[in-house]
Image (tube, helix red, strand yellow):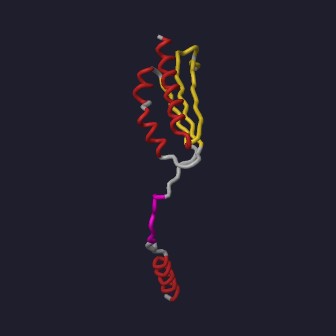
């Protein structure tokens, strides 16, 4: 009988002390910082370039980057299949700094136009 009471006592003590304690805290999202932003887009046609790649979207993404941070943008244009599992691809890549967003946006616009020209010349 003594062991039964000892066992029950240990069981009750274990259950009592193993209860989860309520943790209270405050999560802040005000200090979010984006560093080394890199965007890569893969497209299959000129229409995809026009619809998925809007300069307004790129501007809004760049507005989130502050300070002296590295940024890069790459667009990969998938071409026709050469053989089984192998396709032609053309990639355009722009790298820059968040301090000079206007020049970076101009370069992105140039590679957007180059990607559209690539698909238009292919047809």
The residue located at (52%, 15%) in the rendering is: 80
Residue 48, compared with residue 99, is above or below; it is above
Out of 105 and 19, give the one closest to the viewer. Answer: 105
Looking at the rendering, which quadrant does residue 49 occupy? top left
The percent coordinates of residue 46 (x first, y second) are: 44, 20
Q: Position of residue 66 (x, y in %)?
A: 52, 49
Position of residue 122 relative to residue 112, above or below, is: above
Residue at the far bottom: name it: 2
**Residue at image x 58%, y 44%?**
36
Magenta segment main secondary structure: loop
Residue 105 percent coordinates (x, y): 50, 34
Tell whether position 102 is magenta.
no
Magenta-colored span: 23-30
Tell me if 24 is positioned left or right of 35 in this view.
left
How many numbered circles does the render carry?
Answer: 0
Q: Nearer the viewer, residue 100 or 23?
A: 100
Residues 96 and 8: in front is 96
Which residue is painted at 45% across and 38% down in the image?
59
Is residue 43 left or right of 71 when viewed as pictured? Answer: left
């Amino acid at each position: 009988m003594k062991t039964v009471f000892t066992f029950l006592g240990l069981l009750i003590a274990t259950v009592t002390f193993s209860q989860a304690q309520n943790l209270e805290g405050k999560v802040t999202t005000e200090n979010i910082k984006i560093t080394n932003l890199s965007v890569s887009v893969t497209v299959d046609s000129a229409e995809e370039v026009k619809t998925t790649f809007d300069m307004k979207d790129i501007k809004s993404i760049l507005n989130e980057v502050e300070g002296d941070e590295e940024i890069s943008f790459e667009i990969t244009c998938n071409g026709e299949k050469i053989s089984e599992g192998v396709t032609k691809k053309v990639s355009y890549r722009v790298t820059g700094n968040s301090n000079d967003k206007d020049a970076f946006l101009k370069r992105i616009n140039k590679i957007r136009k180059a990607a559209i020209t690539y698909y238009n010349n292919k047809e």
